[in-house]
Amino acid sequence: MRDDLVGYLLNAIDQPEARRIEAALADPMEGPALRRELEVLRKATRVLEPDREPWTAPPGLAARTLAFVEVEAAKRPLPAPRVFTPAAEESASGPRAWLDRAIIAATALAACILVGPLLLDAITESRARRAERNLQTASTALQGYAESHRVFPTPPDSGPLSRAGLYAPTLVSEERLVADDGTLLVPGTSLDRRGGFRIPSLKELEAAIGTPRFEEMVRTMSGDYGYTLGHRDASGALQPNRNLRREHHPLMADAPDECCERSSNHPGGIHYILFEDGHVQRVFQGDLHRDDHLYKNHKGETAAGTDPEDAVIGDSHHQP
């Protein structure tokens, strides 16, 4: 979203994008910070305001200019090649050289203002596509596990290992995921920038129970992604995550932030969701909880669902 503010300010984006930005500016959570950034950008580009309106050329200007150039060229012979000497270099520092440098600087500034947002958009899109590919890789590993075990990875009903992120060490222990290849990282997040991320195996996780290291491991073991917390039956027992191949039922997604209302993995409010049938969908913030809250069950809790259709995505450390 922040990358699009310059384009919005300069009227360089299409109407759907403009409406999306206006909705974000009006959002009670995200809006105040974005409005402050927009005001800073508005002040920084105020010097360009006189040049924003198009100039209308006088009739016949192009023809008169070409005629003038032709006449002047006929009057003057071509200049000899210029050889720069120390004296010439010294003379080049006069008013004309200063004007040339000013024009070059102004051109560079204009290029940065116009090309910068496009470059940032390209970087953002490249990171988003990489995150989508990573999630698809995780989908392949989960589908393979389900084919072998008839269910997706499911944490224990209770105990210290009853965590949403346990699926990651489970897949690593079966060599369905590589522990340190970055599949469960989203490019540009704090966990990605920190470096050295590695998914622990089940044995390493079990050996760390009761130590301070265990809490850190369960907080990060599934990287930047959350996983389904499953559902409990009428008696309160956690049920296995069966593969019913439902195209509407989330299995993984960008991990929620502390308030469990959205994820901060991507700029612009983008979220990626992996569904039970194996397809990945890109969803914007405004559509995230349209049909069912992604991060909370029907009771409003980040816990296991209350019925088989109550899908809840929890962060790595969340317990069903």
Image (spheres, grey):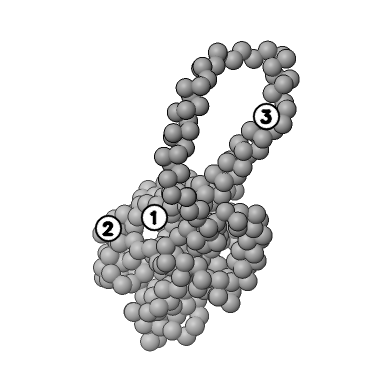
Is 102 drawn above or below residue 200 in the view shown? Answer: above
Query: Which residue is label 3 attached to?
Result: 97
- Residue at 51%, 17% in the rendered image: 78
* Image spot of residue 64 (x, y percent): 45, 39
Disc 3 and disc 1: Cα gap in Å?
51 Å
Is 231 drawn above or below residue 12 in the view shown? Answer: below
Please identify the quarter of the rendering in which residue 82 is found: top right
Task: Single out the mark in the foreground, 3 or 2.
Answer: 3
What amino acid does circle 1 point to?
Glu
Disc 2 and disc 1: Cα gap in Å?
25 Å
254 or 8, which is in the foreground?
Answer: 8
Dot 2 alpha-carbon crowd within 10 angstroms: few under 14, some 14 to 19, many 20 or more: few
Query: Which residue is label 2 attached to?
Result: 148
Q: Earlier in the sequence, mark 3 or mark 1?
A: 3
Please identify the quarter of the rendering in which residue 106 is found: top right
What amino acid does circle 3 point to?
Ala
| Left or right of residue 46: residue 27 | left
- Residue at 26%, 59% in the rendered image: 147
| Left or right of residue 244: residue 87 | right
Disc 3 and disc 2: Cα gap in Å?
74 Å
Element type where label 2 sits in the image: helix
| Residue 226 visible within the image | no
